[in-house]
Amino acid sequence: MKAAFIRETGAPSVIQFADVPDPVPGPTEVLVKVGAVSVNPIDTYIRAGAVAMISKFPYIIGADLAGTVESVGSEVKRFKAGDRVWGSNQGLFGRRGTFSELAAVDERWLYPTPARETDAEAAAGALVGLTAHVGLFLHANLAPGEVVFVNGGAGGVGSAVVQLAKAAGAFVITTAGSETSLAICKQLGADLVLDYNSHNLDDQIRAFSLPHGGVHLWFETQREPTLDRTVSAMAPRGRIVLMAGRAARPEFPVGPFYVKDLRIIGFAIFNGAPEEQRAAADKLNTLYEFNRWKPQVGKTMPLSEAAAAHQLQEDATVKRLGNLHGKIVLIPE
Ligand SMILES: NC(=O)c1ccc[n+]([C@@H]2O[C@H](COP(=O)([O-])OP(=O)(O)OC[C@H]3O[C@@H](n4cnc5c(N)ncnc54)[C@H](OP(=O)(O)O)[C@@H]3O)[C@@H](O)[C@H]2O)c1
């Protein structure tokens, strides 16, 4: 089969696209004919060597996938040939990556794809949808009627947080930086969409949230959190979710933080147990059926262009260049 893989870490150009042996599924694994994969920022950190997750080379890149079951191992119980499936969290902790024509994935990491959801959508929503769901509900216990602030609502994670928080009955404030991103956030259902470059951004957040007591849940998707601003916007007993910015060392307002009984919650989706992620995946599937969750496909490319896709993702998330709206999805030809 064809696959995108690396033999060493480095720039996107280390990604090769060539023939590799077909994977042979173990007893608990499902062999998936891959219909679509998507790129996440973590894929680029792993490829660059910034996150040490590779146990051996050649390493097939990629965490997310969607496709159709080709065959199943002898102990697989939940799937059979012909089923459509999606999943995430591959290419980590010794698991093979997904950027290939065939992928052998343990059934614990796979979920059924809703009948009318395309493989491109299912792959696009995989890691970001799970991250938003696990962050909002498992870790931060979002309740209906609370005010959620999402920094970067048109992004991969942000666009999922906006939709899932709205579906849960929250009031959602979010930010974006261009006309297109502002329009996307409105279309996703946010109650208040603000330009993150606005000079009176914090006043606008306060004007909306104070009648509700302040921001109950701040979901920070940016790599440099501004905790002075965040803490001052929070309602008593509010929760601040931090999930990006490994190198960030922000100033921290201790007094204002503890006198409001605030909590900071950090998490990484790849630490989640398969059962926790499956519970989130089931909820995402139901929300998709009810038109409350729609993964955002931004750009579709052939799998052979994996190196260009990594460059695009890195430019957008790390260098903040370019004009990426929605997820990058790659399709095996
Ligand atoms: N902990 C975990 O489990 C986990 C899981 C997934 C991702 N992550 C991390 O979360 C981060 C976001 O990932 P992603 O996939 O959502 O990235 P992404 O799709 O590139 O989204 C980034 C968003 O940030 C927005 N943005 C840029 N500058 C901003 C600013 N000054 N203020 C507010 N928003 C700004 C952009 O908005 P515009 O388009 O409007 O400019 C864009 O929508 C990455 O660092 C990633 O590694 C962590």
Image (spheres, grey):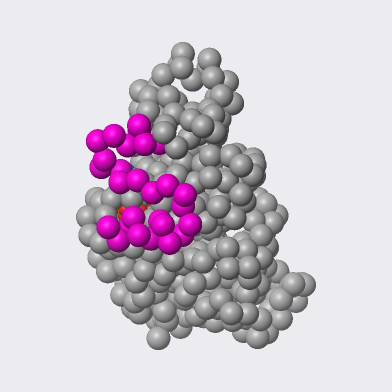
Residue found 55% across the figure and 63% down from its top: 293
Based on the picture, tell me whether residue 191 belongs to the magenta stretch.
yes
Query: Does 141 sit above or below residue 258?
Result: below
Query: Does 71 sit above or below residue 155?
Result: below
* Stretch in magenta: 179-205
Query: Does 65 sit above or below residue 138?
Result: below
Asked whether residue 76 is in view, the answer is: yes
Q: Nearer the viewer, residue 318 or 258?
A: 258
Q: Residue 202 appears in which quarter of the rendering?
A: top left
Residue found 66% across the figure and 60% down from its top: 283
Q: Is residue 176 left or right of residue 140?
A: left
Residue found 25% across the figure and 65% down from its top: 13
Asked whether residue 150 is in view, the answer is: no
Q: Residue 275 appears in which quarter of the rendering?
A: bottom right
Q: In which quarter of the image is the C terminus?
A: bottom left
Based on the picture, tell me whether residue 289 belongs to the magenta stretch.
no
Q: Residue lying farthest left?
A: 321
Q: In this view, does 82 lie to the left or right of 102?
A: right
Residue found 62% across the figure and 51% down from its top: 168
Q: Position of residue 192 (x, y in %)?
A: 42, 47
Q: Residue 30 appears in which quarter of the rendering?
A: bottom right
Q: Position of residue 25 (x, y in %)?
A: 63, 75
In this figure, what is the number of numbered marks?
A: 0
Q: Is residue 23 left or right of residue 206?
A: right
Query: Does 131 sit above or below residue 259?
Result: below
